[in-house]
Image (cartoon, helix red, strand yellow):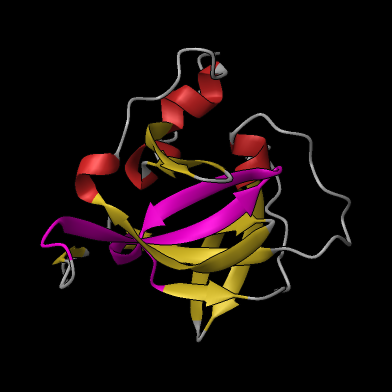
Amino acid sequence: MSADLQSRDSGEQVSLVVSLHVGGQLCGLPVGAVRDVLGPQRITRVPLASAEIAGNLNLRGRIVTTIDLRKRLGLQVLEPDAPCMSLVTEHGQELYALLVDRVLEVVSVPTAGLAALPPNLTSNWSRFGTGVHRFSDGLMIMLDITKVLAFMPKAA
C-alpha cells in the first residue's frame, strides 16, 4: 500500500505518517513502515547484545528484536518501569520493534512540505532523520527506518 495520496480538497500530494514522541520530540515514520503498534510488552534481555538492543519480545509466535529508540538517538533512558510503546516494522525479512515514549496518531502531511533538517541538530538526530514537517506548535522530525535499523559492528 502506498502512503502517498492525492488530497481530495486541495489536489496536493500528501503522505500518511505515524506520529510519535521520543524524548519530548515529535517524530514521524511513514505509515507503510509500521506493521503493528503495541502497548507495554514483556521484553527478554539478550546477553552481550549492544546497549541499543532492549531485548526480544514474542509477537504471535515470532521473536522480535526490540530496539530502544532513546538509546539509538543518544537520549536519556527512561526508568525501567516507565510506560512505553512499540512500533513493529519489518526490515530484511526480520521483525523489529522500536521502543518509543508514545504513539500518537496517523496524520496527513503534504509531500512537498518536507523541509531539510535544521543544521543545529545533534549528530544522532541528523543521522537518522530525513527532514522536518512544520506544524503550528512545533516540528516533526521524519525518521528513516532503514538508517535507524542499520547496525554496524563496532571495530575492536
Residue 68 shown in magenta? no
Residue 23 shown in magenta? yes
Q: What residue sits 63% from the left and 55% below the top?
A: 100
Q: Does 120 sit above or below residue 60?
A: above
Q: Is residue 139 visible?
A: yes
Left or right: 135, with 24 as reference point = left
Residue lying farthest to the bottom in this orientation: 60
Most common SS among magenta residues: strand
From the top left corner, tell me how far across and down residue 60 is, in percent. Answer: 50, 86
Residue range corresponding to the magenta coloring: 10-35
The quadrant of the image that shows the C terminus is top right
The quadrant of the image that shows the N terminus is bottom left
**Tally of numbered discs:** 0
Q: What residue sits 60% from the left and 33% below the top?
A: 73
Left or right: 151, with 50 as reference point = left
Q: What residue sits 79% from the left and 41% below the top?
A: 77
Residue 50, quarter of picture: top right
From the top left corner, tell me how far across and down residue 150 is, in percent. Answer: 39, 37
Residue 138, quarter of picture: top right
Left or right: 80, with 25 as reference point = right
Observer-nearest of 152 and 6: 6
Q: Does 149 sit above or below residue 65?
A: above
Q: Is residue 152 visible?
A: no
Residue lying farthest to the front in this orientation: 9
From the top left corner, tell me how far across and down residue 141 is, in percent. Answer: 47, 39
From the top left corner, tell me how far across and down residue 122 is, in percent. Answer: 57, 18
Q: What residue sits 33% from the left and 25% below the top?
A: 116
